Amino acid sequence: MLQSTYKHMIDRMGRDMIAKQIESNDKLDSFKSKLGIMEEETEKNRSAKQEKTQNHKQMRDQIKQIALDYRQRQERHNSLEKSIANKTEAISRRAIRVKN
């Protein structure tokens, strides 16, 4: 009887070991699958963040360029107004000289 109990215990332990190995393999497969999903999501998030940062930088650059263009136009406008004022003044001085 002792030998049959021993044989039964060994047989049961073998079955338990096989069941645990199958369970372990299933969990390992699940882990690998979830790890792959996590890596894909991480890459998507990184890509989205990079694109957002890049778009933000482009927008800042465009705003800076618009401000620079506006400033240059303003300077050109002021320069033209000064030039017109100087020419008008020169013409009026010449007219005064011609009268005298």
Image (cartoon, rainbow, N blue to C red):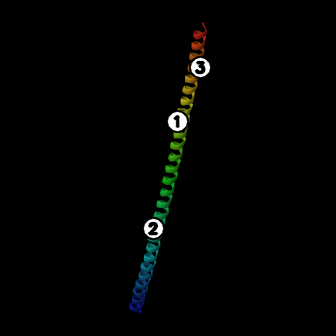
The residue positioned 50% from the left and 58% from the top of the image is 45
- Mark 3 or mark 1, which is nearer the start of the sequence? 1
Of badges 2 and 3, nearer the viewer stands 3
Q: Mark 3 points at which residue?
A: 88
Q: Is residue 88 left or right of residue 26?
A: right
Badge 1 density bin: few <14, some 14–19, many ≥20, Cα 10 Å: few
Nearer to us in this view, 67 or 83: 83
Instruction: Residue 72 in the image: state x and y as whole percent.
Output: 52, 33
The label shown at residue 98 is none
Tell how many labels.
3
- Name the residue type under label 2: Gly
Q: Earlier in the sequence, mark 2 or mark 3?
A: 2
For the residues labelled 2 and 1, the Cα–Cα distance comes to: 48 Å
Asked whether disc 1 touches disc 3, contact meaning CB atoms under 8 Å apart, the reply is no
At x 48%, y 57%, the residue is 47
**In whole angstroms, how far apart are the C-alphas of marks 1 and 3?**
30 Å
Q: Is mark 2 on a helix, strand or loop?
A: helix
Question: Which type of secondary structure does the marked residue at label 3 adopt?
Answer: helix
Q: Where is residue 12 in the image (x, y as percent from the top left)?
A: 43, 86
Residue at the spot of label 1: 68
Counting residues from the start of the chain, the first of labels 2 and 1 encountered is 2
Front residue of 75 and 99 = 99
Q: In the image, is residue 1 above or below residue 36? A: below
Image-quadrant location for residue 21:
bottom left
Is label 2 in contact with label 1 (beta carbons under 8 Å)? no
Q: Name the quarter where the N terminus is drawn.
A: bottom left
The answer for how far apart the CA atoms under marks 2 and 3 are is: 77 Å
